[in-house]
Image: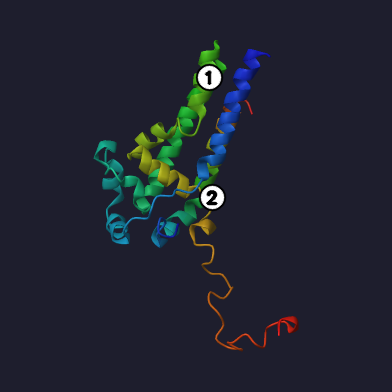
Amino acid sequence: VNFDRLLRIVPAGLLAASLYGCGTRDDKPAADPQVAETLDTAPADDASAAAPAAAPADGGQKPLTVADIDRWDKGMAAELEAVHAAATRLDQAKTGNDTLTAMTDLQDMSTLEAGAQAAGVDRERYNLIRSTSRRRPATWRRPWAGSTLPRSRPTSGPRSGAGTRPSWTR
Amino acid sequence: MKDLVPPDVVTALTPRAAQLRTKDLELVAVRLKGAGM
C-alpha cells in the first residue's frame, strides 16, 4: 500500500464526511422569543463590536437576529482566508504529518474558530449562525406550514365513518 | 426552525440570500479543491 496515497485519501474522506454533516439540524431547544425581540432591537454596531469573551455562555441557543447575517458574512470571509492558507500549506507540505495537519485545517470545524473570531461571537454561537443560515429559506418553516393538506379531520361528511367504510368490513 | 429564524431575520436575509449562498458555496469549493478533490 502506498502510504503517501493513503495519507491523501483518508483525510479527503474525512473532509467529505464533515462537509456532508455541516448542515445538519441543531437539536438545541429554542430560546424564549422575548429574548430574541430584545436582541433584535439592539443596534448592529454594538452587537458586532462585542468581544467573544463578552458573549453569553448560552449564546448558541438564542434565535438568530438580523445582526447575525453580517456576522455570518464576516465569518465566511475569515474562513475563506483560513482555507486558502491551509490549502497553501497543503501544497507546500513535505512530510506526511504536514499533509495531515493541513488537511485537518481545511475542514469545516477547523475554520470555525477563525470565523467565530471575525464574527465577534463564540464558537457555539457562530456554529448555530452558520448552520442555520446555510439552509434554504423553505426549510426554515415547519414542513406543514402553508400546506394545502387539512390539519384536522374535515367537519363535513359522515362523522361515524359508516358511509366511508369499505363494503367488505360491514 | 421557525423559532430559530424570526420573520424579520428572514426578511433581512432574503435580498442577500443569493450573494451569501454563493459565498458559502465558494467556501465549500475551495475546501474541496484544496483537498485535491
Name the residue nearer the viewer: A47 or A60: A60
**Residue type at numbered disc 2:** Ala
Q: Nearer the viewer, mark 2 or mark 1?
A: 1
Image location of residue A143, percent across then percent down: 54, 62
Residue drawn at point x = 56 percent, y = 18 percent: A91
- The residue lying at 51 percent from left, 21 percent from top is A102
Q: In this rendering, would A35 be left or right of A99?
A: left
Q: Nearer the viewer, residue A69 or A22?
A: A22
Host chain of mark 1: A
The answer to whether A15 appears left or right of A52 in the picture is: right
In percent of width and height, residue B32 lies at: 59, 31
Residue nearest the observer in this picture, A36 or B20: A36
Residue at position x 44%, y 58% from top? B10
Does A155 appear above or below A114? below
The amino acid pointed to by label 1 is Leu
Quadrant occupied by the N terminus of chain A: top right
Name the residue: 63% across, 19% down. A6
The image shows residue A154 at horizontal and vertical percentages of: 57, 82
Same-chain check, marks 2 and 1: no
Q: Secondary structure at mark 2?
A: helix
Q: Which residue is mark 1?
A: A100
